[in-house]
Every structure is written in C-alpha cells, then in structure tokens.
Amino acid sequence: MNKSRCAWCGTNPLYIEYHDTEWGVPVFNDDKLFEFLILETFQAGLSWITVLRKRENFRNAFDNFDYKKIVKYDENKFDELINNAGIIRNKLKIRATINNAAAFVKIQKEFGSFSKYIWKFVHNKPIVNQWENMDEIPANTELSDIISKDLKKRGFKFVGSTVIYAHMQATGMVNDHSPSCFRYKEVLI
C-alpha cells in the first residue's frame, strides 16, 4: 500500500526512511538534539540529502556526536577532521561544532538540560502547522529568529534562523508534515 508522504522526500529511499522515522518526531534527549544541531550546521548552504548520505561518517568522525568529547577536541583532532573525506570538510563548520559543544554544555548547566532550554521557546509543546503545499513552508519564522539570536548571544556559531527552523522541524518542535501525510498525526503529542 502506498503511503501519502510529504512531497519533499520524493522517492529517494534515504529521504523516505528519514521522513518516515525521524523528521518531525519530538526529541527531548540532549544527545539527539546535539546530533541534529551538528547535522543542521553542516547542512547550511547544502542539501539535506548530502548530510544524510554522510551521517554515519559524521557519527564516526565526531565520536558518536558526544558533546562531552567534542568540547575537548584539540588541533590534532581538528586536523584529523579537516582531512576526513567522509565528512563535509568546512573549517568554519568544524570549528563551530567544537565551539557549539562548549556552548551546549553551558546551557545544560544553566537550565538543567539543553532540552529544557530549547523547548521552552514553544512552551514544551510542538507547534502544529497545516501547510498543504511545500511552497507554503517557510525557511524561517519569527520564532526561529528569536531562538537564533538567543543561541548566538550564548556563543553558538552557524545557527542562523534557517538552520534553527530546520532544527525545529527535524526535532519536532514544529510539525510541518502535510496534513495529508501519514506521519502528520503520528508525530502529534
């Protein structure tokens, strides 16, 4: 039986798997939130499929997205990463990831968890949209602008409003599944 899906995932099996199992599912786990933050950072200016194809390489290169290890990365580790052909080798994004691990830990100390911090922006409940057409879905919103500014104020890099809105979509802070998509109701909490 063919399932009705959001148009953006098309027919690519990797996109379909991501759409059907992860995208838009509310994430409250700090480890997973950090993983998506890294991936969204590297996605900036590129297509999401590029990042998905390299996801396991990123997982291996960045110690399973362990921010407690990433925060301790030195120049040797940076050199190793910049020479890793399996990931996106952008110096600024790699440095931003190391920097963001430290900023992430600071937020955890202040709020008890990154999850408590980030989810407070939506009052701990996903925003449920009802976009019928992909063209209606914004690249960023007033709320993603606010979150982006706050993260930058707290020392994060590569967290522009578009990156943050993509993070909100990926982690279920907003439900941007089309109402006709089989996942639309499944991800509601």
Image (spheres, grey):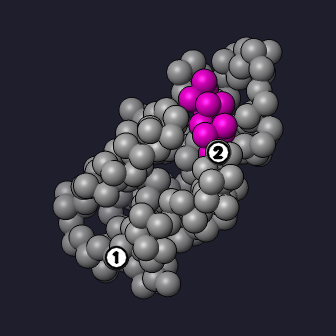
The part of the chain drawn in magenta is 94-104
Judge whether residue 20 can be spotted in this image: no
Residue at the (53%, 71%) spot, across then down:
26
* Residue type marked 2: Lys
51 relative position to 147: left or right: right
* Residue type marked 1: Val
Q: Residue 8 location in percent, x, y?
A: 35, 58
The residue nearer to you, when weighing 188 against 15, is: 188
Q: Which mark is residue 25?
A: none
Q: Residue 25 location in percent, x, y?
A: 53, 71
**Outermost residue, front direction?**
110
Nearer the viewer's eye, disc 1 or disc 2? 2
Residue corresponding to mark 2: 106
Q: Is residue 186 magenta?
A: no
Q: Is residue 101 magenta?
A: yes
Residue at the (53%, 21%) spot, across then down:
92
Question: How many other residues sit within 10 Å of disc 2, few (<14), some (14-19) or many (≥20)?
Answer: some
Residue at the (49%, 79%) spot, across then down:
187
Question: How many other residues sit within 10 Å of disc 1, few (<14), some (14-19) or many (≥20)?
Answer: some
The residue nearer to you, when weighing 142 against 139, is: 142
Q: Which mark is residue 128?
A: 1
